[in-house]
Image (cartoon, rainbow, N blue to C red):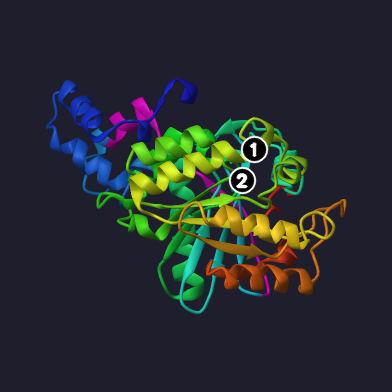
Amino acid sequence: MKDQKKDIRALSKEQLRDFFVAQGDKAFRGNQVYEWLWSKSVHNFSDMTNISLTTRELLNENFVINHIKVDQMQQSKDGTIKNAVKLHDGLIVESVLIPTETRTTACVSSQVGCSLDCKFCATARLKRMRNLNPDEIYDQVVAIDQESRLYHNRPLSNIVFMGMGEPLMNYNNVLKAIEKITSDEGLGMSPKRITVSTSGVPKMIKKLADDEVRFKLAVSLHSAIEEVRTSIMPFNENFPLEDLRESLEYWYAKTKSRVTYEYVVWKGVNDQLKDAQALVRFCKYVPSKVNLIEYNPIDDGEYQQASNQALDMYIDQLEKNRVPVTVRRSRGKDIDAACGQLANKS
């Protein structure tokens, strides 16, 4: 019978109000239920304590709350927490809490598996099984916020869509989730504290700009030389750098929001002066900054972290050309929670 019941969180507040009116009840009952579902994040109708037993039974007969469950939680020695999150249909995704002295960041997943084929990423080796629903994305954030309060005595401060999946290939659900996360009726977080990271889907980057989103945009770039980028991210053949560049120029013209380039330097792949110079040129198209990311090997060792000298050469080239650059040291490596390592080994 459960399969026939509708997931109540797929309904808007208006639809909930209409449901109660159709049952001969007051419309405001829909508002009460909506508040329990979103700002209080309850898992069961029985927990809706200011609603009569009869109404709770009615909800139970008609609807289900497809809530996620943290199936397994691992803590790294650096304080990072990785959650294996079980979805209502038994599939698993992973999300990560990354603490620093001043903030805690949630790294959330948007797909089960991934639609793209980046060769250096463990998630890309899993076939894409399905997109996550808005409530499943929202629930990851709620779970990490609770862990942040419990283990670090402070609420979650930032969210990055850098977990499993390509967020722009699940565009509508990601935007609906962010709408709920930033709404006063949801978690009330500022969109400025949210970063959506894409491997670079030009058409969807333009759509983000047209939709006037207020969150930040990051692009996993890794090379500004066409054939090098295609060798590590084969889908680049369909979305060449020229198209990506044009979409980012469009993004900046519309939003006035600078772009962050996520960039890993690998030994023998993109660790030469010409690679750094190509990146500098690409950075000149729109106001941007570069996050140089420490690489986390996945099992076969095909890709290796470049030398410190290569990293220093990149930093030198970027700084000389006044491109802001930071080096992001990996967190949670001992529990496979670092960038590119999320693959449900559990």
Residue 264 x %, y %: 69, 58
Q: Secondary structure at mark 2?
A: loop
Residue 74 lies within the magenta run: yes
Residue holding disc 2: 164
Q: Residue at x 64, y 37 (%)?
A: 114
Residue 7 x %, y %: 40, 30
Depth check, front residue: 229 or 246? 246
Horizontal side, residue 1 vs residue 335: left or right? left
Residue 172 can be seen in this image: yes
Residue 87 can be seen in this image: no
Residue 182 lies within the magenta run: no
Depth check, front residue: 243 or 193? 243
Depth check, front residue: 42 or 121? 121
Q: Residue at x 37, y 31 (%)?
A: 10
Instruction: Give the residue furthest to the bottom.
Output: 101
Residue 179 x %, y %: 33, 44
Q: Amino acid at mark 1?
A: Cys
Residue holding disc 1: 114
Q: Secondary structure at mark 1?
A: loop
* CA distance separating discs 1 and 2: 6 Å
Q: Which mark is on residue 174?
A: none
The residue range painted magenta reads 56-77
Depth check, front residue: 118 or 130? 118
Q: Is residue 164 above or below residue 207?
A: below
Count of number-bearing discs: 2
Q: Residue at x 36, y 50 (%)?
A: 181
Q: Amino acid at mark 2?
A: Met
Please tell me how crowded label 1 is: few (under 14), some (14-19), or many (20+) other residues with Cα within 10 Å: many
Residue 245 x %, y %: 53, 43
Q: Is residue 245 above or below residue 284?
A: above
Mark 1 touches mark 2? (CB < 8 Å): yes
